[in-house]
Image: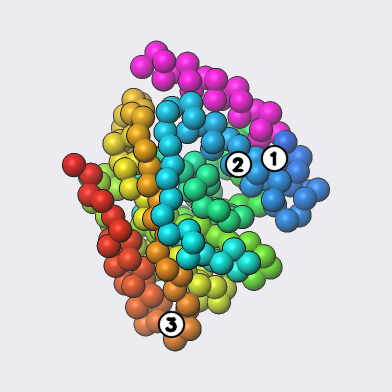
Amino acid sequence: MIFTALKILLLGMAAIPISIIALLSAPIDRTGRTFHTMARLWSALILWMFGIKVHTKGSDQLDLSKHYIYVSNHASAFDIPAVVVGIPDDIRFVLKKELTRIPIWGWALKYGHYITIDRGNARDAMKSLDEAAERMRHGASVILFGEGTRTRDGNLQSLKRGAFSLAVKAGMPVVPVTINNTFKILPRGSLRVNPADIEIVFDKPISIEGFDGRDGEERLMKQVQEAIARNYIQPE
């Protein structure tokens, strides 16, 4: 626990200059690529510090000249740095508004190029989805943790419809992403970090053609849920 606390302290210190650079880049680099580069640096540092490696499968199915909405399962706080490092695309997160209240790091999220959603306000949440769709149409892929929150027992949860509403609005294909072997790295309620190898599996991108309306969104959601489940390795 002492070593974990020291590592967290060092990461906190490293977060300050990285977040400042990310903040300063936001109004200068409108593409958001510098911001994402800082996020990748920060994420790689976290994973290295705790002895965690990320392996990917299926990335050869991605056409990086296109933009996607990536939808993944969510089992650990380490899913975030894992996908930032593992997804070979210039991605933007859709994240909950509460995270932007964290000093420096949260400010970087708020004033950077990520998209925040106030989950307690349905109107603001829908406005944020419209904003995300607009950003995607102008050159950025987006990632969402489709279950909405982390699993408590390692089992996959049902996906929420918001991600698929966004996909249909944006007219972008969906990539089902399965994250394996993160549940025991940092279980909810624990402060102990267990080194592990994370596997990220990319399934074949799904075109949103023919998935119009609420019924189409629900059919798309079911197809993505099945793809994630097919590649998921149940924690022992």
- Name the mark nearer the viewer: 2 or 1: 2
Mark 2: give few (<14), some (14-19) or many (20+) Cα within 10 Å: many
x 37%, y 50%: residue: 179
* Picture mark count: 3
Alpha carbon separation for disc pair 3 and 1 = 37 Å
Give the residue number, with chain letter if any, for mark 3.
Answer: 211
Tell me the magenta residue range: 1-20
Q: Looking at the picture, tell me which residue is in the foreground, 144 or 36.
A: 36
Give the residue number, with chain letter if any, for mark 2.
Answer: 39
The quarter of the picture where residue 162 lies is: bottom left
Give the residue number, with chain letter if any, for mark 1.
Answer: 22
The three-letter code of the residue at mark 3 reads Phe
Query: Which residue is outermost to the top?
Result: 2
x 18%, y 42%: residue: 236
The image shows residue 135 at horizontal and vertical percentages of 65, 65
Mark 1: give few (<14), some (14-19) or many (20+) Cα within 10 Å: many
x 69%, y 51%: residue: 33
Q: Are the residues tagged 3 and 1 within 8 Å (C-beta)?
A: no
Q: Decide which of tag 2 and tag 1 comes sooner along the chain.
A: 1
Is residue 6 on the magenta stretch? yes
Q: Name the chief secondary structure element in magenta.
A: helix
The three-letter code of the residue at mark 2 reads Ala
Q: Secondary structure at mark 3?
A: loop
In this view, 218 is above or below 43: below
Alpha carbon separation for disc pair 2 and 1 = 8 Å
Q: Are the residues tagged 2 and 1 within 8 Å (C-beta)?
A: yes
Q: Secondary structure at mark 1?
A: helix
The three-letter code of the residue at mark 1 reads Ala
In this view, 236 is above or below 221: above
